[in-house]
Amino acid sequence: MIELAGVTFAYGVSERPVLADIDLTVGAGELVLVCGRSGCGKSTLLKLVNGIVPGAEEGRLDGRVTVAGVQPQDVRLQELSATVGSVFQHPRTQLFTLNTTDELLFGCSNHRVPAPEMLERLRTAVDDFGLEALLDRSIFELSGGEAQKIACASAAMLRPSVFVLDEPSASLDADGIDELRAVLAALKRSGATILVAEHRLHYLTELCDRVVYLDSGRLEAVLDRETFVALDEERRSAMGLRALARVEVGPRLRPAATPAPEGEASAAGSLLVERLRVERKRRLAVDIADLELPAGEVIALTGPNGAGKSSFAAGLSGVLRADASIVADGRALSRRERLRRSFVVMQDVNHQLFAESVIDEATLGHDLDDDAAMTEARAMLESLGLGAFLDDHPYCLSGGQKQRLAIASALLAGTRYLIFDEPTSGIDRDHMERFGRRVQAIKHDVDLVLVITHDTEFIDACADAVVELDQGRVVGRHRLRRVTPP
């Protein structure tokens, strides 16, 4: 069904190949997991299969790629989309309409699927993906996880024989991942051929037939499922791979201290949310009172997709207008002051990359004649695995590398409130752990480290406290019992 023979690919006029000497065959009906460290070439391999490279994105391809008997670079993308369904790492980049129901029907309409058949497919997609609450919604009101669901369902609506999914679980909560797993299982039973590039591995270990491991653009290993699952912790760690079973932090949570009584001061530097009400499109997305965000801690903000986590961060930081009373050091902060004190790393970092090179992006707004600042920036980028890309354009980086660049910019910004929205999506084990160590190291130098995340591996590794949101309200506050190594 899919064959790559002697494939080497480099973007643009770059002399540095992203993939080199790849030989791979995927049989009809197989589900193959593609894994490896961030920047190893996973996304590019998928783009070769769905024709995006070298079709929509320029580059030099050597070797042969064949999918369902055709070479993707010789077929128009709109024709190939009927055979290969794609789900991108950042789902908003593949949404075309303003309304979720229109989006689900968009591909079928372009391919002139008869109306009765379209409606039948829509009903099936709604049931399979649990989309009842997402129908007839504005695309712009969706959370990242909700947008991911719509993107997955839209691809399935065309009933292609091949699916390629790039980090499909990156923005999903635990329930969403379970639903995604069920859908992939159903697609596999129907005979579809599936390629999934992932860092979160736990939900695929029982589904995959084989595992393709890439390292620095080269195919280092192809393992059957049993061999892959049998990898010990030392070997998996050396490969930079995440856990093969879902990490549960629930047993280690304990109730957080209640807010300070009225009139009693909070700890120095802590933020006290006395009131925060955020509206989105005339809908109340966040309604919170009496929440203390302690200084000197890494706080994980969790909750189901659509719970209001990103809206909370935007209102708290001043990015969005809000009815707010946010108190620090005994006085209320204006929206302008909260904006000045905050640095927010967005869920889709493509929205906040502006410079022409990686080093320029990391030092944006800094004095370039300050040798100490430049040395610090280079050291930061090196520590996050970006030292070899200082002169590269940010948009030439992989998704995980862009995420790390935005993290570097935040850590170098010198602001007092650091807010990260799903910073570990698209990031491998090594860099997730490096980021965790970084935020632990700086948490006493700033007044707030808030991480919006579904990533239980990250929470388990470095969070000190957890705040749970649901339907815009706080439903739980916890601290983690830290286990001291023997």
Image (cartoon, grey):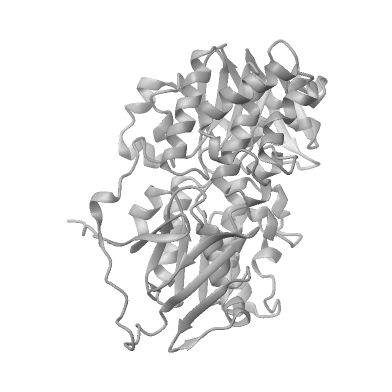
Residue 298, above or below 384: below
Residue 90 x/y as whole percent: 63, 44
Q: Quadrant of residue 165?
A: top right
Q: Quadrant of residue 217?
A: top right
User: Residue at 23% across / 50% down in the picture?
Assistant: 251
Residue 243 x/y as whole percent: 37, 39
Image-based side of 430 in relation to 411, left or right: left
Residue 369, above or below 181: below
Along the line of sight, the residue nearer the viewer: 346 or 401: 346
| Count of numbered marks | 0
User: Residue at 63% across / 55% down in the picture?
Assistant: 349
Residue 56, above or below 323: above
Image-based side of 281 in relation to 284, left or right: right
Whether residue 438 is visible here, answered yes or no, is yes
The outermost residue toward the left is: 486
Along the line of sight, the residue nearer the viewer: 152 or 86: 152
Residue 259 x/y as whole percent: 32, 75
Q: Quadrant of the N terminus?
A: top right
User: Residue at 52% across / 64% down in the picture?
Assistant: 312
Whether residue 463 is visible here, answered yes or no, is no
Image-based side of 11 in relation to 322, left or right: right
Q: Quadrant of the C terminus?
A: bottom left
Residue 431 x/y as whole percent: 48, 52
